[in-house]
Image (cartoon, rainbow, N blue to C red):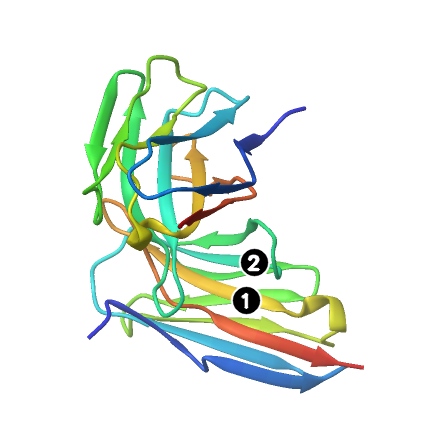
């Protein structure tokens, strides 16, 4: 199916564990983004990528790692999950300076 | 002070009412996005605009660059319009407002 998909949709993990959230887009958009959404905050940028093998930090990058070896995939890894990383995570892609396309989100709970 | 402010934070309406959601920003932008998020759902882009006005069905978005202000209007509102509406401004990245929660009752 065409579009942008995130997996898993829901994840519960324990403090200290490593967890990876996957994001896959079928359009070959240049730009990809990871955001987190928390009550009382707007969406906040964690990391973004302008192209394969190019990544940059966003507003709240601490505790996260990304990679982009292929244009269509942009996984987000929490190296050692903490309770403060409990959130809803959204991946998005953009072909350029145009509208953004968002995934369905991943609800992550760290216990 | 947040760089993107939306008002109101919460809005209830009766079916058929005309609805306006406002967005003010304090930074220079290249474009402004309006997004829709249904409960438990993903985020959908409604509009991207850098000047003037855009219309799609019952939705109208306007922007005044000089006043750093945008509005999203919904004409003849319907319960299925119930959602969170998010304004985001494009600088070197997207900066998001905290959203306006709209509930439309039959």
Q: Nearer the viewer, residue A85 or A55?
A: A85
- The circle on residue A14 is none
Are dots 1 and 2 on a single chain? Answer: yes
Q: Quadrant of the C terminus of chain B?
A: bottom right
| SS at badge 1 | strand
**Residue at point 66%, 70% (across, down):** B82
| Residue corresponding to mark 1 | B84
Q: Residue A18: percent from the left, percent from the top?
A: 33, 31
Q: Residue B53: percent from the left, percent from the top?
A: 50, 63
Please, is residue A42 above or below residue A21 in the view?
below
| Residue corresponding to mark 2 | B37
Q: Is residue B49 left or right of residue B89?
A: right
**Which residue in the rendered view is the most extreme toward the top?**
A69
Q: Nearer the viewer, residue A71 or B34?
A: A71
Chain of the residue on which disc 1 is drawn: B
Q: Nearer the viewer, residue A89 or B54?
A: A89
**Residue at point 54%, 74% (across, down):** B101
Rounded to the nearest angstrom, the CA distance separating label 1 from label 2 is 5 Å
**Residue at point 43%, 45% (across, down):** A89
Please, is residue A16 above or below residue B83 in the view?
above
Q: Is residue B19 left or right of residue A87?
A: right
| SS at badge 2 | strand
Q: Quadrant of the N terminus of chain B?
A: bottom left
Find out whether the residues at labels 1 and 2 contact each other: C-beta distance under 8 Å. yes
Q: Residue A10: percent from the left, percent from the top?
A: 55, 42
**Residue at point 18%, 43% (across, down):** A62
Q: Residue A104: percent from the left, percent from the top?
A: 56, 43
Mark with earlier residue (1, 2): 2
Please, is residue A66 above or below residue B38 in the view?
above
Chain of the residue on which disc 2 is drawn: B
How packed mark 2 is, by other alpha carbons closer than 10 Å (few <14, some 14-19, many 20 or more), is: some
């Amino acid at each position: 199916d065409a579009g942008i998909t995130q997996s898993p949709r829901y994840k519960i993990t324990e403090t200290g564990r490593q967890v990876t959230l996957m994001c896959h887009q079928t359009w070959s958009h240049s730009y990809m983004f990871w955001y987190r959404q928390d009550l009382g905050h707007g969406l906040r940028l964690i990391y973004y990528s302008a192209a394969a093998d190019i990544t940059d930090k966003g507003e709240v990058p601490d505790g996260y790692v990304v990679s982009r070896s292929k244009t269509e995939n942009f996984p987000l890894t929490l190296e050692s999950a903490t309770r403060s990383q409990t959130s809803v995570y959204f991946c998005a892609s953009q072909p350029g300076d145009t509208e953004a396309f968002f995934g369905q989100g991943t609800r992550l709970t760290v216990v | 002070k947040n760089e993107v402010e939306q008002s109101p934070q919460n809005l209830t309406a009766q079916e058929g009412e005309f609805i306006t959601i406002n967005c003010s920003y304090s930074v220079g932008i290249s474009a402004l996005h309006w997004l829709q998020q249904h409960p438990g759902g993903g985020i959908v882009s409604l509009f991207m605009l850098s000047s003037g006005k855009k219309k799609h069905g019952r939705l109208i978005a306007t922007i005044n660059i000089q006043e750093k202000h945008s509005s999203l209007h919904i004409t003849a509102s319907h319960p299925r319009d119930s959602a969170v509406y998010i304004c985001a401004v494009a600088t070197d990245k997207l900066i998001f407002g905290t959203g306006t929660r709209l509930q439309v009752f039959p």
